Every structure is written in C-alpha cells, then in structure tokens.
Image: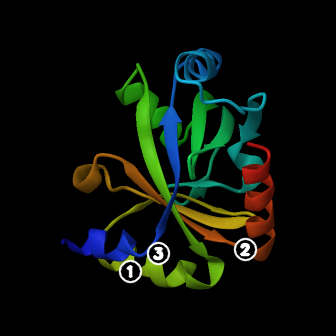
Amino acid sequence: MNSINKTIAGLELAQIGWVVPDIHAAVKFLSNALGIAGFPQPEHIRAQDLDMTYYGQVVAGDWLTTQTYNGGTFIELVQPVSGQSMFHDYLAKYPAGGTQHLAFRLPVSDFNRITDNLRKQGYAVISEVDHPIARMAFFDTYQTLGVATEIMGITPEGWTAIEQMQKTR
C-alpha cells in the first residue's frame, strides 16, 4: 500500500463530488433514473464569501452546489458559474463533467495530522476552507488516484449538521 493509501485508510469516506455542466440535469437524472432523492435546490456559492483559497489565494469564483445523503455517503454536485476554482479547472479539462473529488472526514482535532502528512508526501493543496462546521483541504491527487482528495476536519457543530442532514433523507 503506498503512502497516500496508508494516510487515508483510517478515514471515513464521506462524500463523492461531481462537477457537472448542468446541475439541474444532473439532479433530474440522479433522482428520476437512479432514485437518488433529497437534493435541495442548488445554492449559489462564492469562494470569496468562504475565504476559500485557490492555490493559496482567495480569488473570484462562484458555483452552484447541492448535495444529498445516500447509502452512507453524501453525493455533492457542483456546477461552475464564473471565475476560477478547482471546479472550473475540472470542467475546462472534462467538459462533460465527472467525479472530481472524494472527501474523507475525521474529527477536526486530527485534521492537521492528516493534512500535514499529505503535504510531507508532496501532495499540493489546491483549495482550503476554514468553515464553522469543518476545515477542508483539497489535495491534488489526480496522478495517484484519478481524483482530488478532500480532507474534512469536522467540528462539533459540523457533526450536529451531518446528523441533521442524514435524518432528512
């Protein structure tokens, strides 16, 4: 097992993130064709409002996003709208969209241990967010895993939010 697999082996897979060109078409397909229900109305997100970095800088970027809980994992859909972000980069490279990231979660108290380990292994950070419910870091693991890897350090408030989202499904 290589180093990255050892690093993420003890973490819980929390989310599959798809970047799509049309979020409404993706929700319709997942809901109608596959029976994956519970997607709320897409929300407009601005990177600047989250202080979300893109290669170390907060830059203008916005997207639509929605997610639902299904079978133990959250399914997140992201449609880039304007500006720059890792989501825009992905859709530019793969215009049809696809699975862009896998998110692994752990208590926020272990966040630095895992993210420092990935940095020491040479994986670059694409984006970071420090949100009241979670600290998040997206690593460039495309060459190793074929997708970006998100590490989510969940705060106590975040665990409460997760439980609420799971109950609505």
Q: Amino acid at mark 3?
A: Thr
Q: Which residue does the image show at 41% across and 19% down from the upper left?
A: 96
Crowding around mark 2 (Cα neighbors within 10 Å: few <14, some 14 to 19, many 20+) is some
Q: Which circle's residue, 2 or 1, is located before the other in the chain?
A: 1
* Residue sitting nearer the eye, 8 or 123: 8
Q: Which residue does the image show at 60% across and 16% down from the upper left?
A: 32
Nearer to us: label 2 or label 1: 2
Tell me whether the residue at label 2 lies in contact with that at label 3, contact meaning CB atoms closer than 8 angstroms: no
Q: Which circle's residue, 2 or 3, is located before the other in the chain?
A: 3
Q: Amino acid at mark 2?
A: Thr
Crowding around mark 3 (Cα neighbors within 10 Å: few <14, some 14 to 19, many 20+) is many
The residue that disc 3 covers is: 115
Tell me whether the residue at label 2 lies in contact with that at label 1, contact meaning CB atoms closer than 8 angstroms: no
Q: Is residue 140 left or right of residue 157?
A: left
Q: Amino acid at mark 1?
A: Asn
Could one spot residue 132 in this view of the protein? Answer: no
* Picture coordinates of residue 72, whole percent (x, y): 57, 53
Q: Which residue does the image show at 57% across and 73% down from the upper left?
A: 106
Q: Which mark is residue 117?
A: 1
Q: Which residue does the image show at 59% across and 63% down from the upper left?
A: 136
Crowding around mark 1 (Cα neighbors within 10 Å: few <14, some 14 to 19, many 20+) is some
Q: What secondary structure is found at the residue carrying circle 2? A: loop
* Residue sitting nearer the eye, 126 or 77: 77
Q: What secondary structure is found at the residue carrying circle 1? A: helix
The residue that disc 2 covers is: 155
Tell me whether the residue at label 3 lies in contact with that at label 1, contact meaning CB atoms closer than 8 angstroms: yes
Q: What secondary structure is found at the residue carrying circle 3? A: helix
The C terminus: image quadrant: top right
